[in-house]
Image (cartoon, helix red, strand yellow):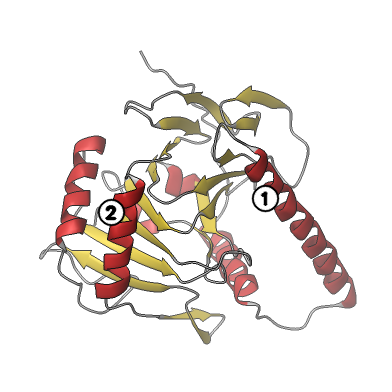
């Protein structure tokens, strides 16, 4: 019997509007953009103040929590009725149900609105092993800082990247360089994830966030939308960072802490209906590496 309740409402957002929103989000994250009216600037300043207050609330909530590293947020647009669940309170109609294991010992799982599935394991890799792998990647990987284009202008990406892949995988949509050969550690992690999740990954995207200034704005991994390619396994090493899911249509958000050694899995139709981001955190001074195992 299915352990989850699945909501079936679908967002009515055109691809053109979604693309424009993504470009504007990236532009805001980079701190660029054209001139705005005094009214718009005032609204932006007010929104920034609220965002700062909100970030402080999140930090206080996370610090005070001793039973879970999960922080859950309601929609910033309007007050929704809520239901108490594991990890906090969730907007009614956004998330159906948490489970205690998600089919894997120690893993939590939640069904998202519109057919998405999100799973999380707070300590998939032991701390000592995570520290060892992090040190090796910082030392051995040929990290690159790629260029990104926003409204016709080119900027340096606010993070560094590398990728590994099987021989039959074509050039990455993220980096046009040749992939780095699979290392022993990455091959072992890949095999462990494949056994855990019951799928086969054929490439890995590595992101290095050098400190809290490095980030990634709201986006969806479009290459994971085609049937059979929807599973993305994401491992975190190093500094703890925030991970935010945002429903494309309603803008309701869920936020989670990502400590070193934690695993997050996005599956189902998550990439079709949800976006995700790793926001800036000025107080973070240490590096974090994110390993995202994927199917091309």
* Quadrant of the image containing the C terminus: bottom left
> What mark, if any, has residue 22 been given in the picture?
none
Relative side of 72 to 40, left or right: left
Helix, strand or loop for disc 2: strand
> Badge 2 is on which residue?
294
Quarter holding the N terminus? top left
Count of all numbered marks drawn on residues in the image: 2
Residue 46, placed above or below residue 162? above
Would residue 39 appear left or right of 55 to someone viewing this image? Answer: right
Few, some or many residues within 10 Å of mark 2 (<14, 14–19, 20+): many
The answer to whether residue 283 is above or below residue 187 is below
At x 85% / y 77%, what residue is drawn? 37
* Label 1 secondary element: helix
Query: Upstream in the sequence, badge 1 or badge 2?
Result: 1
Residue 172, picture quadrant: bottom left
Point out residue 54 in the picture as x, y percentages from the top left corner. 74, 52
Name the disc covering residue 59, or none: 1
In the image, farthest residue toward the front: 128
């Amino acid at each position: 019997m299915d352990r989850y309740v699945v909501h079936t409402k679908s967002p009515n957002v055109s691809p053109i509007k979604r693309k424009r929103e993504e470009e504007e989000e990236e532009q805001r994250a980079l701190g660029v953009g054209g001139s705005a009216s005094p009214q718009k600037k005032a609204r932006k300043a007010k929104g920034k103040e609220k965002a700062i207050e909100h970030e402080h609330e999140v930090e206080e909530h996370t610090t005070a929590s001793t039973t879970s590293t999960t922080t859950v947020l309601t929609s910033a647009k309007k007050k929704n009725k809520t239901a108490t669940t594991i990890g906090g309170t969730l907007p009614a109609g956004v998330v159906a149900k948490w489970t205690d294991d998600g089919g894997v010992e120690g893993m939590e799982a939640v069904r998202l609105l519109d057919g998405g599935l999100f799973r999380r394991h707070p300590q998939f890799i032991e701390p000592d092993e995570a520290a060892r792998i992090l040190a090796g990647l910082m030392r051995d990987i040929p990290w690159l800082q790629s260029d990104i284009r926003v409204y016709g202008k080119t900027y340096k990406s606010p993070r560094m990247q590398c990728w590994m892949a099987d021989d039959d995988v074509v050039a990455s949509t993220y980096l046009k360089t040749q992939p780095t050969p699979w290392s022993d550690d990455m091959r072992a992690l890949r095999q462990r994830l494949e056994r855990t999740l019951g799928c086969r990954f054929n490439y890995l995207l590595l992101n290095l966030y050098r400190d809290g200034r490095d980030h990634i704005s709201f986006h969806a991994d479009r290459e994971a939308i085609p049937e059979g390619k929807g599973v993305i396994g994401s491992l975190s090493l190093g500094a703890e960072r925030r991970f935010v899911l945002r429903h494309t249509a309603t803008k309701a958000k869920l936020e989670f802490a990502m400590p070193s050694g934690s695993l997050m899995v996005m599956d189902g139709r998550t990439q079709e209906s949800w976006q995700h981001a790793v926001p800036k955190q000025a107080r973070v001074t240490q590096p974090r590496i994110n390993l995202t195992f994927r199917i091309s």
